[in-house]
Amino acid sequence: MGDDERTPRRDATDRPTRSRDTRDAGRTRRRFIWLAGTAAMAGLAGCSGGGGGGGGGGATETTTAATTESSGSTGGVPEAYVTATSLDGTQRNPDSLSSQEAVSYQDEPKDGKQCSTCRYYIEDKNGDGVGACAIVAGEISPEGHCVSYVEYEG
Ligand code: SF4
């Protein structure tokens, strides 16, 4: 009797309508979830690729920095000095510099004259104790000297 009172028949009567709706809704929901998941995976794949690209970007930056330092286009100095201005305001042109050999550059003063008092000297910009020169290539010591020395009177 109890079994009959549960009346599977009554459920069966109600079920077709509600069940079909529920099943359809469930299918639609599952399909949406599947599509969303697929889209998400595609998105993740894209991000993953982007991340790889980002890593590549980092590598590129490293390569670029290395290339810049070794290319000679900077005149043998860190980026901060490439087109910096000297004590008297002369702007360094990396494409028009004398070599240190050509001007007999040395790391020591001569006759009391040194780069740090020369009008062409570019002071240290990165705390490593050396600077650059507006007319001579390469890093320049403030205690250095060359034949192009001109006292800065500014
Ligand atoms: S002495 Fe020569 S290397 Fe030194 S700052 Fe002057 S021009 Fe440049």
Image (cartoon, rainbow, N blue to C red):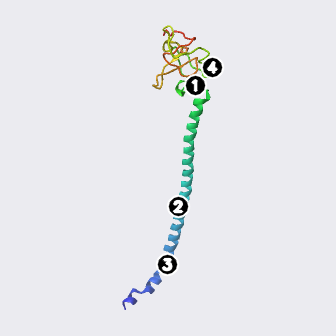
Which residue is identified by label 3? Answer: 17
* Label annotation for residue 76: 1
Q: Secondary structure at mark 2?
A: helix
Q: Position of residue 49 (x, y in %)?
A: 57, 50
| Amino acid under disc 3 | Thr
User: Looking at the image, do the residues carrying marks 2 and 1 touch, with CB atoms under 8 Å apart?
Assistant: no
Marks 4/2 in contact by CB < 8 Å: the verdict is: no
Q: Are marks 3 and 1 in contact (CB under 8 Å)?
A: no
Locate residue 6: give its quadrant: bottom left
Q: Are marks 3 and 4 in contact (CB under 8 Å)?
A: no
Q: Nearer the viewer, mark 4 or mark 2?
A: 4
Residue beneath label 4, please?
Answer: 96
N-terminal of the pair, mark 4 or mark 2, is 2
Residue type, mark 4 in image = Ser
For residue 37, the mark is 2
Task: Tell me which numbered mark, 3 or 1, is placed earlier along the sequence.
Answer: 3
Q: Residue at x 50, y 7 (%)?
A: 111
| Rendered location of residue 57, percent (x, y) | 56, 41
